[in-house]
Amino acid sequence: MFTDRRIERHQLPYFLKVFNRFTDKPMGYLGNVCEDGLMLISQLPLLVDANFELRLKLPDSDGHVQVVDLTARCLWCHEDVTPRYYDAGFTLYQPPPEYTALITALRQYFSFYPLPASA
């Protein structure tokens, strides 16, 4: 039986929390991202067709926190496969450059690139 790992696993130290920008209360966790939207996983259902002011708090390499504020509209919300959790899809209004940088960093971190064939 094969037991040696050939691809290194990258364990995330924690999930990226999403906060209400005005109250600073946690709303849930980032489920996935794209250039003009995101999915939020929360313990409460969210109001569809409502606008939300969101805040991401991203750790930087110096141990400081970078804040990314987003204005988003909830397009859909339904129960997650995990009981008592909900998934909500958002479209973003004019995402800032820091959000685009986050997407680029996540793509690089979670992508596998083929190695060139050795002759």
Image (cartoon, rainbow, N blue to C red):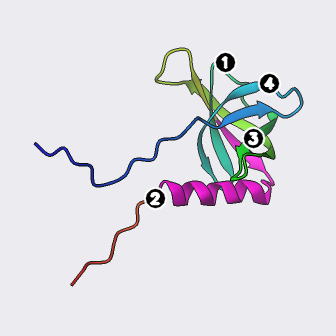
- Residue located beneath label 4 in the image: 25
- Give the labeled residue for mark 1: 44
State yes or no: residue 108 in magenta: yes
Nearest to viewer (mark 3 / mark 1):
3
Task: Work out whether mark 4 precedes mark 2 in sequence or the reverse, and give the earlier one.
Answer: 4
Q: Is residue 16 visible?
A: yes
> How packed is label 2: few (under 14 Cα within 10 Å), some, or many (20 or more)?
few
Mark 2 or mark 1: which comes first in sequence? 1
Q: Secondary structure at mark 3?
A: strand
**Distance from Cα at disc 4 to Cα at disc 1:** 13 Å
In the picture shown, does residue 103 fall above or below 114?
above
Q: Position of residue 49 (x, y in %)?
A: 75, 33
Distance CA(mark 4)–CA(mark 2): 32 Å
Identify which amino acid the numbered label 4 is placed on: Lys
Find residue 78 and name its label: none
- Distance, label 3 to label 2, CA atoms, is 23 Å
Asked whether residue 62 is drawn in magenta, I would say: no
Q: Decide: marks 3, 4 in contact (CB < 8 A)?
A: no
Judge whether 60 appears above or below 20 on screen: below
Disc marking residue 57:
3
Q: Position of residue 10 (x, y in %)?
A: 45, 47
Cα separation between marks 3 and 1: 20 Å
Report the residue at 59% width, 24% height from top.
86
Give the Cα distance between marks 3 and 4.
Answer: 12 Å
Q: Are marks 3 and 1 in contact (CB under 8 Å)?
A: no
Reading the image, the residue beneath label 2 is 111
Q: Which element type, helix, strand or loop, lies under badge 1?
A: loop
Identify the amino acid type marked 1: Leu
Q: Residue 97's spot in the image, x, y percent?
A: 77, 60
Query: Is residue 113 depicted above or below 5 in this figure?
Result: below
Q: Image check: 82 left or right of 75?
A: left
Mark 3 / mark 2, whichever is N-terminal: 3
